[in-house]
Image (cartoon, rainbow, N blue to C red):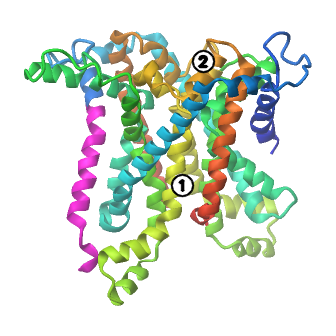
């Protein structure tokens, strides 16, 4: 409790306090008169809000895509793979144990102007000039992140599917439900907590993502996390960065509260 | 059998996607055995030179060692805390219990960039120099939800009357804990530790804000990505590290199966 208080609650409170600070001058602990100036300046700059919106939409799209693509994987592992499921699961997870940054780099190598796709297309004579549109944009960021998250998204869905009592399938079949109807009425609703958990396990890291945009996104692919990182490193405007972080934290919390209203995530851990 | 319908398209999808997931990794591996530092078709010559060069690249090896130190330290701390909180959570009733549980799981829903800058602020205010310690502390915070959930679900899975039986037979609580509870949850502790280890070992977003003069492997890797000719060496190390992780995971799985 003490540990969490010291290294989790305190820093967040401190950040909240810092976001009400007028500027960076003076010692860190020197008292200051609280001001809303950071928030008003954030509010005045439309591009921050636009970027927050874009980042939320991007994370939403990535979360949904990763979940939709991962669902059949989990379904296969839980209900169809049979005795070799454990081995297949390891097979699915190995990419996830490869360095995250390097997997992002792999996409840079794939998509770059001297990258694999371009040099292959030139080699085969399909194109003469390298395509520059592949890398350094938001599409590259989205593609890369979906790729990175698919194995991870499969895990909570798998856990939820494994929890379903097989007797339910038999009962449904005995009562004459066709496979599709069986899936829609039984399997899908019962796995929903896993689906939501998977979505948030992708969505939350993605909305704060700043490394992938730096590597494959370029300035055109920047996300909200990048401006926070900028204000704490290059620009060294910590109060403004704190205000931006608080806004992101609040936005995330609101979404999570809405989600827990929709689905009882605690079912997953019981 | 009716339940098996749709198996074939599903397995085609599964293995198709597996191949897609492995392609970029295969590409990386290819780069690490390619004689030139850029990968363009056709591939000229294969070599293991990069792997040999790795042993002279001291800064690279040191960063890997730093990552190992941080991952070992933070995963032990997170497992210990996770075990303690699980036992407190499921075997005791006290005021502020719900608050403790909520707090322990909350780091799961805070974006890393937010936690990273918040900790950076804290350490700056306290005049603590950034080091491997600061990274380790951050990793313990983010690994705790995972270890807690893994251990708590195992602890909830067995009947607490076993403990009562041990106490009735005259064991005091520490003995019961040592002789009954801990052996029962040991497999869960192991997989919790492993999860925490992998979370920490590959973590970049927090470490970038909190690293001082000693970078971890992801942070060092990031600083080197600008230089294309450094990439094959870094990949060579990553390949070796991945093999190491695989061995570790297989060993842990073995132990877990035997215990369970």
Chain letter for the residue marked with disc 1 in the picture: A
Residue A197: mark: 1
Q: Position of residue A25 (x, y in %)?
A: 82, 10
- Write the residue at 47% across / 38% down: A58
Residue B21 magenta-highlighted: yes
Residue under label 2? A230
Identified at 46% across, 73% down, the residue is A164
Q: Residues within 10 Å of mark 1 (few under 14, many from 20)?
A: many
Quadrant of image for the N terminus of chain A? top right
B258 versus A214 height, above or below: below
Residue B233 image point, x, y percent: 35, 16
Q: Is residue B63 magenta?
A: no
B35 w.r.t. B175: above or below:
above
Q: CA distance from mark 1 to mark 2?
A: 30 Å
Answer yes or no: is residue B240 visible. Answer: no
Q: Chain of mark 2?
A: A
Location of residue A239 in the rendering, given as x and y in whole percent from the top left corner: 75, 21
**Label 2 Cα neighbours within 10 Å, binned few <14 / some 14-19 / many ≥20:** some
Looking at the picture, tell me which residue is in the foreground, B164 or B63. Answer: B63
Question: Extreme left residue here?
Answer: A125
Of the 4 image quadrants, the one containing the C terminus of chain A is bottom right
**Quick one: SS at disc 1?**
helix
Left or right of A218 in this view: B67: right
Mark 2 element type: helix
- Residue at position x 23%, y 80% in the image: B1
Give the residues drawn in magenta, as a range: B1-26
Q: Is residue A181 left or right of residue A43?
A: left
Q: Residue A14: x percent and y percent?
A: 80, 29
């Amino acid at each position: 409790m003490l540990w969490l208080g010291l290294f989790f609650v305190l820093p967040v409170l401190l950040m909240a306090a810092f976001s009400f600070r007028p500027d960076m001058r003076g010692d860190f602990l020197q008292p200051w008169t609280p001001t809303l100036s950071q928030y008003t300046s954030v509010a005045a700059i439309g591009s921050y809000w636009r970027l927050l919106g874009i980042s939320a939409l991007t994370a939403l799209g990535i979360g949904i895509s990763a979940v939709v693509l991962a669902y059949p994987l989990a379904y296969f592992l839980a209900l169809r793979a049979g005795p070799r499921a454990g081995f297949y699961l390891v097979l699915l997870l190995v990419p996830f144990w490869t360095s995250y940054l390097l997997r992002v780099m792999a996409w840079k190598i794939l998509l770059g102007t001297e990258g694999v796709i371009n040099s292959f297309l030139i080699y085969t004579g399909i194109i003469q000039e390298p395509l520059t549109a592949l890398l350094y944009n938001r599409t590259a960021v989205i593609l890369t992140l979906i790729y990175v998250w698919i194995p991870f998204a499969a895990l909570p869905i798998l856990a939820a599917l494994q929890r379903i009592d097989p007797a339910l399938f038999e009962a449904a079949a005995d009562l004459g439900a066709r496979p599709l109807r069986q899936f829609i009425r039984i399997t899908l609703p019962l796995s929903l907590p896993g689906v939501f958990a998977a979505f948030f396990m992708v969505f939350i890291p993605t909305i704060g993502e700043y490394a992938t945009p730096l590597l494959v996104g370029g300035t055109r692919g920047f996300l909200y996390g990048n401006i926070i990182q900028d204000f704490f490193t290059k620009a060294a405007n910590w109060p403004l960065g704190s205000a931006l972080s608080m806004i992101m934290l609040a936005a995330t919390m609101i979404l999570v509260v809405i989600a827990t209203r929709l689905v009882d995530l605690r079912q997953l851990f019981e | 059998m009716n339940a098996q319908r749709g198996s074939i398209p599903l397995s085609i999808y599964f293995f198709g996607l597996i191949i897609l997931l492995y392609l970029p990794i295969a590409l990386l591996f290819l780069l690490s055995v390619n004689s030139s530092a850029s990968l363009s078709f056709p591939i000229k010559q294969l070599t293991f030179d990069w792997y040999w060069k790795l042993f002279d690249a001291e800064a690279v090896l040191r960063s890997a060692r730093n990552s190992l130190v941080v991952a070992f330290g933070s995963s032990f701390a997170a497992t210990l805390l996770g075990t303690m909180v699980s036992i407190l959570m499921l075997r005791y009733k006290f005021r502020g219990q719900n608050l403790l549980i909520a707090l322990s799981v909350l780091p799961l829903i805070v974006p890393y960039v937010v936690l990273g800058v918040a900790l950076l602020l804290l350490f700056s205010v306290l005049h603590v120099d950034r080091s491997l310690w600061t990274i380790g502390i951050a990793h313990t915070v983010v690994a705790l939800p995972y270890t807690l959930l893994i251990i708590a679900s195992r602890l909830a899975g067995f009947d607490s009357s076993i403990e009562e039986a041990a106490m009735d037979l005259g064991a005091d609580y520490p003995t019961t804990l040592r002789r009954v509870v801990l052996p029962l949850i040991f497999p869960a502790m192991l997989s919790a530790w492993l999860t925490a280890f992998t979370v920490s070992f590959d973590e970049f977003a927090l470490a970038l804000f909190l690293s001082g003069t000693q970078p971890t492997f992801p942070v060092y890797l990031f600083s080197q990505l600008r230089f294309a000719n450094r990439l094959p060496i870094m990949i060579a190390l990553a390949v070796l590290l991945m093999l190491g992780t695989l061995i570790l995971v297989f060993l842990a799985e073995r132990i877990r199966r035997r215990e369970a």
